Amino acid sequence: MQKVYSNADEALDGLLKDGMLIAAGGFGLCGIPELLIDAIVKSGVKDLTVASNNAGVDGFGLGKLLDTKQIKKMMSSYVGENAEFMRQYLSGELELEFNPQGTLAERMRAGGAGIPGFYTKTGVGTQIAEGKEVKEFDGEDYILERGIFADLSIVKAWKADDTGNLVFRKTARNFNPPAAMCGRVCVVEVEEIVPRGSLDPDHIHLPGIYVHRIIQGEHEKRIEQRTTRKKETA
């Protein structure tokens, strides 16, 4: 199977449709599939549900899809860095399904493993548990969470070979592996495509069986929160 494509537009060709569920990797601005997001913006597809830890920042990452009103619903655990996200949610323009961070990651991983649901203690007795099945195990209450089965996964990796084996770099290995696993089709953007056989099998973080299409590109590496201190003087 030919997995390497020339650019994001080609890699997403035939995969996008209105109303689809997309799982997106990334944490803050680290490891986000920015090139694929730009291509989705350009496509004009709308009424999207996006499962992602957060929604980027204003004007970058998933924030671009919020600016164009292409996202109908977010499934997220953190929304504190995006003013437009907050505005749309508070005005009723955007539906939001809050998930504890570990629960969201496990929902993606479960979907990738073919597991339709699992029980967790996280959220018991809170608003997170409202409307969910509660079951007792060994005298403790647990709530049922559903696995996420996305129509499309978009993720960012550091290196790939042409079969789709992926290596992530440091913090970018966050939501990207579980997000990649849970999509019926997974499209990956990478910084470098290396020859087949050059990756140490022990260093591969996600096997190519989960990956369907790959692009290589240049990426902007933003700092989400720049913190500095004044230079000390004698």
Image (cartoon, rainbow, N blue to C red):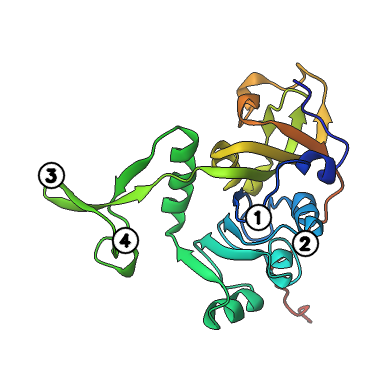
Q: Tag 3: residue type? A: Asp
Q: Tag 2: residue type? A: Arg
Mark 4 neighbour class, 10 Å CA radius: few under 14, some 14 to 19, many 20 or more: some
Check the image and report above or below for 26 versus 62: above
**Quarter of the rendering containing residue 66:** bottom right
**Separation (CA) of disc 2 from disc 3:** 47 Å
Could you say whether the residue bearing mark 2 is in a helix, strand or loop? loop
Residue 229: x percent and y percent?
A: 72, 77
Name the residue at 42% across, 59% down. 100
* Of the two numbered discs 2 and 1 in the rendering, the one whose residue sits closer to the viewer: 1
Residue that badge 3 annotates = 138
Q: Tag 4: residue type? A: Gly
Whichever of callouts 4 and 3 sits on the residue coming sooner in the sequence is 4
Whichever of callouts 2 and 4 sits on the residue coming sooner in the sequence is 4
* Of the two numbered discs 2 and 4 in the rendering, the one whose residue sits closer to the viewer: 4
Camera-nearest residue between 53 and 194: 53
**Separation (CA) of disc 3 from disc 1:** 44 Å
Could you say whether the residue bearing mark 3 is in a helix, strand or loop? loop
Q: Tag 1: residue type? A: Asp
Name the residue at 81% across, 30% down. 4
Q: Which quarter shows the C terminus?
A: bottom right
Kindly identify which numbered label has been placed on residue 18. 1
Kindly identify which numbered label has been placed on residue 222. 2
Kindly identify which numbered label has been placed on residue 123. 4
Could you say whether the residue bearing mark 4 is in a helix, strand or loop? loop
Residue 109: x percent and y percent?
A: 48, 40
Q: Answer with left or right where residue 79 lies relative to residue 70.
A: left
